[in-house]
Image (cartoon, coloured by chain):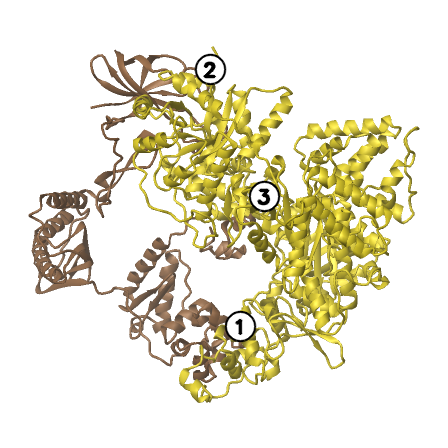
Chain colours: A brown, B yellow
Amino acid sequence: MRLAAPDTRALQLGLMPGLSLADARARVPELAAIDHDPAGDLALLEWLADGCERYTPMAATDPPQGLILDITGCAHRFPNGETGLASDLARRLERLGLTARLARASTPDAALALAEFGGNEVKALPVAALRVEAETHLALRRAGLKTIGDLATRPRAPLAARFGEALPTLLARLLDEEDTRITPRRAEPAIWTEARFAEPLARSEQAIEVISGLAREAAEAMSRRDVGGRRFEASLFRTDGHVARLAIDTGLPTRDVAMLARLFNERIESLADPLDPGFGYDMVRLAVPLTETLAPEQLQLEGRSMAEVEVAGLIDRLSTRLGKCRIQQLQPNDNHIPEQAAFTLPAQGKPAHIEWPKPEEGDPPLRPLQLFDPPQPITVIAEIPDGPPRRFQWQRASHLIVLYEGPERIAPEWWRRKDGHMAGKGGLTRDYYRVEDAGGRRFWIFRHGLYGTEKASPDWYLHGLFA
Amino acid sequence: MTVLFAELVAATNFSFLRGASHPSDMVAQAIQLGMTGIGIADRNTVAGVVRAHVALKEAREEIGRDIDFKLVAGARLAFVDETPDIIAYPATRYGWGRLTRLLSRGNLRSEKGGCILRFADLLEFLDDLLLIVMPYASPNEERPRRKTVVYDGLEIEDADPGALNEILCTLCDRAVGRIWLGATMPRRGDDARRLVCLAEVAKAAGIPLLATNDALYAGPDDRPVQDVLTCIREGVTLAEAGQKLEANAERHLKSPGEMARLFAACPETIASTQALMDRVSFTLEDLKYEYPHEPVPEGWAPQSWLRHLVETEAHKRHPDGIPRKMRDVLEEELGLIERRNYACYFLTVHDVVKFARDECDPPILCQGRGSAANSLVCYLLGITPVDPIKEKLLFTRFLSEERHEPPDIDVDFEHERREEVMQYVYERYGRHRAGIAATVIHYRSRSAVREVGKVLGLSEDVTSRMTSTVWGSWGDVDEERISETGLDPGNPEIDRLHELVRRILNFPRHLSQHVGGFVLTEDRLDETVPIHNAAMDNRTFIEWDKDDIDALGLMKVDVLALGMLTAIRKSFDLMRLHGLGDRHLDNVPAEDPAVYAMLRKADSIGTFQVESRAQINMLPRLKPREFYDLVIQVALVRPGPIQGEMVHPYLRRRNGEEPIEFPSPDLPHDPDELRDILERTCGVPLFQEQAMKLAIVAAGFTPAEANELRRAMATFRNPGTIHELEEKMVDGMVRRGYKPDFARRCFGQIKGFGEYGFPESHAQAFAHLAYVSSWLKCHHPAVFTCALLNSQPMGFYAPAQLVRDARDHDVEVCEIDINASHWDSTLERSDKGSLALRMGFRQIDGFREEWGKMLLAARTHRLFDSMEALGRRAGLPSRALRLLADADACRSIGLDRREALWNARRMPEGELPLFAAARAAELADEPGVTLPAMPLSEHVATDYQMTRLSLKAHPMAFLRSLFRSESVLSCAEISAGRNGARVKAAGVVLCRQRPGKGNAVFITIEDETGIANALLWARLMNSQRQTVMASRLMVIEGVIQRSREGVVHLMATRIHDRSDELERLTSGCSIQPQPSYSDEIAHPQMPRGNGHPRNVRILPRSRDFH
């Protein structure tokens, strides 16, 4: 593990990015470290870029930590023009607790380089500002060309011949010899449709109707491309500039208009603060940013896949209404401990191919379907040290055991316990027995601890009932 | 009623990453539990059975009476074709051969470490094998070897073995009465039901069921270790291992009573184990061994042929008649050889040496040593250069009849050409008769911490942190070490890691080949022990290591590699080439005073054996004047004598500061008995022969007892035994009239030999090479340095130090140049007529030998005049051109590094065909570009990056003013400093060593004026360990200590890491000065006999005292 982003104080203590965590800890034992979360960082960066749309529609990200704003013609609204804009941005970022290095230049590359390496003068920047490969970088330095200025004054053709055709281009971009544009962040979705209204829509119900209409158009567009949508985003643009965004996800790609309408309806109903049309919506847009291949053939005829589709539809509806994490599905877990042999996951999403362990042919089920949590304490009469149980008492009822099989001996996970690797400290072993009482009822009971070696008189528990 | 039971399916940790107990622990536990025997069956190997065998033998000795316990040796066969696992035990010696043949075949099909077996293979080698068929198969996926050696039956036919009952039927037909079906009660829940099913299967097939626990470890507490091993094997952490782990801790050895209880439903399964055991008559003692008869011509018996060879040679040397003394010794030796039947052994070694000398072109230099090597026979056969009569060595001292041990001869060959000799041996005797011994690679702290840490889910930087402060690969990971790394030893995770590492330490991890010990047999070797593919092509090795071979009395010939022999041969070649005389190992002028004068000045960098820091310190004290002084010097500066505290008494006596006296025993014993043994070494035992002789003569040990003493010293296995022997020796000496105090001191000295002592014949052989290399260095420094550079890597010093030393000796050293250099370094006549050393292309990091050849071919007729000519005519790829330019090798065409690189980067890859046809200038004119000149410091830094040395300046020269301002002295000033002065020195780190018991760390630093040696006591080291180990450039504060002989040490108190200053030279590009090969941080040293064979030091170890 290495340091990804030391904060100001850590930097002052001499901790640099790339230093291994153990080294850093050795130097600064009280160092607090948080796992690096690149996805989270990117999300933050994008969120910031969205926020910067207040300055210019032309905002782009330069991951992992750069933002590029094209502020051509945007600065007039600020006192002191560009400087005012920059100080406004700096102030807002500071308020968010972020440290920012701002730089202005005539090309995005130059601005990024100045922000990264500091200074005001592009020609004073080190050649590293070109962001070339390490080998080329070393070669430039070996040639004694250490700054952008060193390169700028020399003929380009020999440079291109030695350091690659890309170098003059990169150089030109830095030096404002080539017009470069940024690609704004909000990329065009694969499929989108929109409707504008001369007279704003005043009621949400109308909006749903419009969305259904748009969905129909989108579905046609999708079926032309043999795709179905996995994510749908409706944007309701209010006349006063506010944008309400509604998004729904589906487990399987779909272009079923009726279902989409139903899902949007449910989404609107489940909103914490209901849609407020205010002065009305003057534009509604439906975008499908995420699509997957969906074959054109109809699925109705095949019963089985139909059932699958219906289950998926049900899961989508319930998940949309109740929340993604509310609808869960059981998954097998590779573990010897019975209560850890399965766990649940949100049901929506790509259904993984789940394979449950099957008993050998002809074998009875070895474990009950459901377990008591926690296991029920019982009193048992059994042979010592590890003989089978003869009779047990559960909830004041006594059961005479007539048939048994076992024990299935399951040792504890010693590595989860303090000192578990030491003899006798690993925890208690369980001996499971499948037993049948005189009434034909079957139970799954276990002895907790090996007699004598682990525990003087082990307790017994009932862990489940067989159907 | 006592139950008679033996566990017959027991794995040991030689079932790598499966079994979790040592073979000895399994045997001990089985005896403890009252079993009647144990069957050791590891997965497709018999690598662990010898150890089990030895453990049982030792247990018998310890208990002092015969125990009714039988060890059955075999293997568990795991197949690739889903055949269930089958445990095979040979009933007879013939059956053993079948089993090892079967395993050999499987091994040779597979990549190193694997074994590819099919059911059909078993059917071929079924004779005399008793088989336990397990009802389940363990998955076995192996990678087949792409390039196989020649061996019969390696091709594979696809055949489906069928279901369990079919397999049983097939086996029952072919091996009537030798099949059992293994039944286990693993506590899986359905055990009873499965047992009934198995009983039905067995009944249907008409074979008995056999009770077993399929044991993986000795006791239930070993489960955590087994779980960890499973995780290592599967490459998962414990948390994610899930059902890859065993569900419970049941797979340990269980007592007969418990087994009887488990199998109460089928008591006959318990009885089966006794039935099977009774059928086995084979034990490992039955492996009779015979040496190959090959080197004997038709019509001769080995003994008479050996006599003939030796006598012919003796007559040649003494045409006027063999001296009487020689004849006596010869008769004695030949008589002993005949009685012990060792003639073939000597002939085989002779044959290998003869091949290297006479049949190779050019001949390969070689030289022998070892216990049997101080024989007159070896001297006359030309195996060793040491004349035992002249040097008063006695062969019989080490090869006595009482010691039923095979003789030992090691032969060193030029390290670059040893492979030729090895392949000759394979060819001469065949793959099925010759194999290299194995070396068992064990878990060491580094590897164990790394792998166990991974299993526990610790991140790599935590574990590498823990291992980074382990000195060498062997050091202990103790709590102190851990807290130094900033990790909390009290942390439960770290504590767990620590404990599990401790338990896994010394577990075998895999087999590898020994450095060069060949085992040769007259009969098929593969019917004695299975053969494996080594990682290297065309190498095969057997799966028993040195100890196993010793235990079974097999003999081996060591074919070893020695870098110095390569360097000496290259020196002789260069001398011939440049008209400096025709020299061989045996005609270098002897006893040249100039050579000794040079050594007395401690001027020995690059020479053999006397070049290390410790040796250099010793040279001015010992002041060698004759050959025997070198013999002593070589033997003296060894951990053994140093730990035995013999060095200082010896020096004092030699310099006449202490009387040399030989305590005498009481009458009637010979008062001069000690004088005879110790006279040549001033009364201090320095050689192993002396130590043993001392025990025999002065303490009245029998040779066998002396041998026991030797063994006890070597292994330190049993501290009790050592103590017992000490009492015995001291008592013996006191009884004969010696003072107890003297007796104890003698024993202390002998104890020091344990690990590292030298027998005199070794010292003689090495001293010979030390002398030859010193002679070369003294008279032909350019030749010697050139040869050393061309034999790298070898020796203690890196090229930078060798070149520097040569320049200090007025050798002109020339830069690498495209118009002058070859791949190797070469010698040129300079204008003054002296020989100058021209560095070769091999010095450039990343430059390939084939590029060197291409360049040279294009240069034969015409020199290059431009970068373009170089690129076009030599057809070099642009990477090669850039490397040449970056190494500043284009000065002869008027380009310095920067210009050359500027031109080289312009060269396109390859030549365009059209232009080639026209031979026109391919590159168009371009506008001129002026580049800033490269500062010298940057040149030097780049030189270091490209070639690891610079002829232009030392990096420290550029930092001198900086350090001067901090009142740091130069190394030269330190050497000239006043005793007791408090000073600071700075330099790049050449070498860090922590010899012996590790109370002190020696650090050697270098600057532009020379080197300085610093000593840091261990207690000071611990607080600045990180600095000591991580610095490339350090400032050392300390006090100058000057000995009477003028040896200067800086007694360090504080070390500062100033590596960052190196960055200043180039503003950003870092310099990595290369430490010498003796630096124990950059080149961790493995202790003798424990490390990976490839890493075993060129400095060979003692052969006789282990």
- Check disc 2 and give the amino acid type: Val
Q: Earlier in the sequence, mark 2 or mark 1?
A: 2
- Check disc 1 and give the amino acid type: Trp
What residue did someone put label 1 on? Answer: B851
User: Residue B274 in the image: x percent, y percent?
Assistant: 46, 20
Q: Earlier in the sequence, mark 2 or mark 3?
A: 2
What residue did someone put label 2 on? Answer: B3
Work out which quarter of the rendered image holds the C terminus of chain B and state it. top right
Q: Secondary structure at mark 1?
A: helix
What residue did someone put label 3 on? Answer: B522
Chain of the residue under the numbered disc 3 shown in the image: B
Quarter residue B542 falls in = top right
Mark 2 or mark 1, whichever is nearer to me: 2
Tell me what residue is drawn at x 16 percent, y 62 percent.
A191
Q: Earlier in the sequence, mark 1 or mark 3?
A: 3
Q: Choose between B928 and B305: the one closer to the eye.
A: B305
User: Residue A95 in the image: x percent, y percent?
Assistant: 37, 57
Q: Secondary structure at mark 3?
A: loop
Mark 2 or mark 3, whichever is nearer to me: 3
**Left or right: A348, with B384 as reference point:** left
**Circles 2 and 3 on the same subunit:** yes
Q: Is residue B931 visible?
A: yes
